[in-house]
Structures are given as C-alpha cells and as structure tokens.
Image: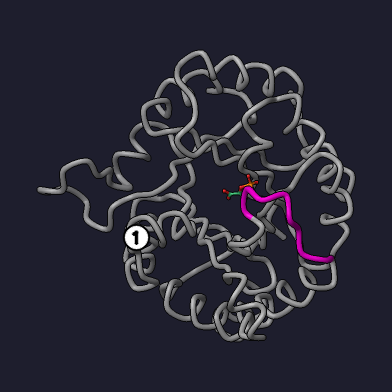
Amino acid sequence: MARKLAAGNWKMNGTRCALDELSALAKAHPDPSVDILICPPATLIRTAASLVDGGPLLIGGQDCHSQVSGAHTGDISADMLADAGATHVILGHSERREDHGESSDDVNAKARAAHASGLVAIVCVGESLAQREASNTLDIIGGQLASSLPDGCTAANTVIAYEPIWAIGTGKVPSTAQIDEVHDFIRARMIRRFGQAEGAAIPLLYGGSVKPDNAAEIFATDNVDGALVGGASLKAADFSPIIKALEGTV
Ligand code: PEP
C-alpha cells in the first residue's frame, strides 16, 4: 500500500514570503507518517524544493505540458518540473479543464509526459453540480478516468483526486456516503483497468473544501487515502491539523 498523502494546491497564490509557511510546516512535521506535498506556483518550485531538501516535505507542480520542449510560450514541461525539484504534478484540475479548455485526452498526454519524467501524476476528476443533480456523477467520473489515465498507471506513478467541482472553494462538502460511493467506484475502476495489485494501491484523494474541522470524518471514509487541499493548505496553522487527522488513520 502506498503511503497516505496530504497534498496542498496553492494555485495562483504566494510570493517568496509564503515560503515561511513551508518552513513552519516542515518544523511542525519533522517525521510524518504520511506524505506531505505542497504544489506552489511555478515561480516558487525551485526555491521551495531547496528549502525542504533533506526533509520529508515534497514539492509538486500544478500543471505540465505534454511535450518535452518546444515553441509553447508560457508552458512548463514535466522535465523542467523534475529538474526544479518537483516529485509530483497535479493534472486535469477542474480549473485547468474549465479555464484552459483541457480535455481528458490532453490530461492523458500530460500524464504520459509526467510518467516519462519520473513525476507522480495526480489526476483530478469530478462532476459539476448539474451533473450530480442529473444523477450522472458515476458516468462522468468513469468517462474522465477512462480517457485521462494512460496505460501503465501504478501506485508508484499515479494518484487520483476526486474533486466535485461544486465543492471546490465553496465550503460545501459531499456527505461521507457520497464520497464513499464515488471512491468505491474509482477503486473498482482502478482494479479493473490496472489489475488487483496496482489498482488496489493507487492512492485516492478527496478534494473540495477540506478543512481542519471536517478532515477526520472524511479520512474515516473507505478508500480515502488522503486529500487535495486548496485554501486550507496556504497556512501551516490550517494544513497541519489536516495532516494530523490523516496521520490519525495510519
Ligand atoms: C482544490 O483546488 O483542489 C481544492 C480542493 O480547493 P479547496 O480546498 O479550497 O476547496
């Protein structure tokens, strides 16, 4: 079984002074029993990776291009992220799918690039409120998984993040029964596609308004191996209790 993972997505937040939060997090968790990952803006990755070097904290990117190099102004390749010290990259976040028109095929190509560069791909899937209300959640998630994941996914190179779009940054959280239903479904799909050993071990994160006061209940749900956290990962004082709640399940 892969280690559980508390992943923070800083999105487009943070200049160099935000790295004080990273130092505070490293100090608060010198020997964590779960993996702790922070995905800062690209401008901070190299400095953040140097800062946590030798310690248990991991640094990731928030997106990568599917090509290794070339005429793609403003983009970053998976090789560049790895070279800067990243170990993971978030792919197919709903904000990328919506703001940048990324399709699941695009995410698939990016995941292949991430794997080729030795990065762990954190592939995000999730339904909109309209899709949930139309009872299409599992169809949507099943389709996104089938198209976004390349062949060859293993527990060592892939993490799935289930992030209902309507729960991201809204303070709304699905019931544990709803999380349970989707995570069980994703687990079954992982086993069917990648085999029992890898499919059962690929970490499944929940993401969407995870906070210190709801983390323990979410982490008690079957097949929830951690969280992808946005707003509450920006301050060590908020992220630390979430990490501790996850450690409480180990
Ligand atoms: C996210 O952006 O992946 C996320 C889960 O954000 P928040 O925790 O702020 O809802």
- Eyeballing the image, is 107 above or below 9? below
The disc labelled 1 sits on which kind of residue?
Lys
> x%, y% of residue 85?
42, 32
Q: Residue at x 49, y 39 (%)?
A: 11
Q: Is residue 15 magenta?
A: no
Q: Mark 1 CB in 8 Å range of ligand 1?
A: no
- Eyeballing the image, is 132 above or below 154? below
Is 5 placed left or right of 250 in the picture?
left
Q: Residue at x 43, y 20 (%)?
A: 47
- Eyeballing the image, is 157 above or below 215? below
> In the rendered structure, which segment of residues is drawn in magenta?
168-175
Is 137 placed left or right of 46 in the picture?
right
How is the protein colored in the picture? one colour
Q: Is residue 173 magenta?
A: yes
Q: Residues within 10 Å of mark 1 (few under 14, many from 20)?
A: many
Residue 141's quadrant in the figure? bottom right
> x%, y% of residue 151?
42, 76
- Find disc 1 in the rendering and name its residue: 110
> x%, y% of residue 203?
66, 60
Q: Residue at x 61, y 85 (%)?
A: 136
Q: Residue at x 49, y 46 (%)?
A: 88
Which of 4 and 72 lies nearest the eye of the viewer?
72
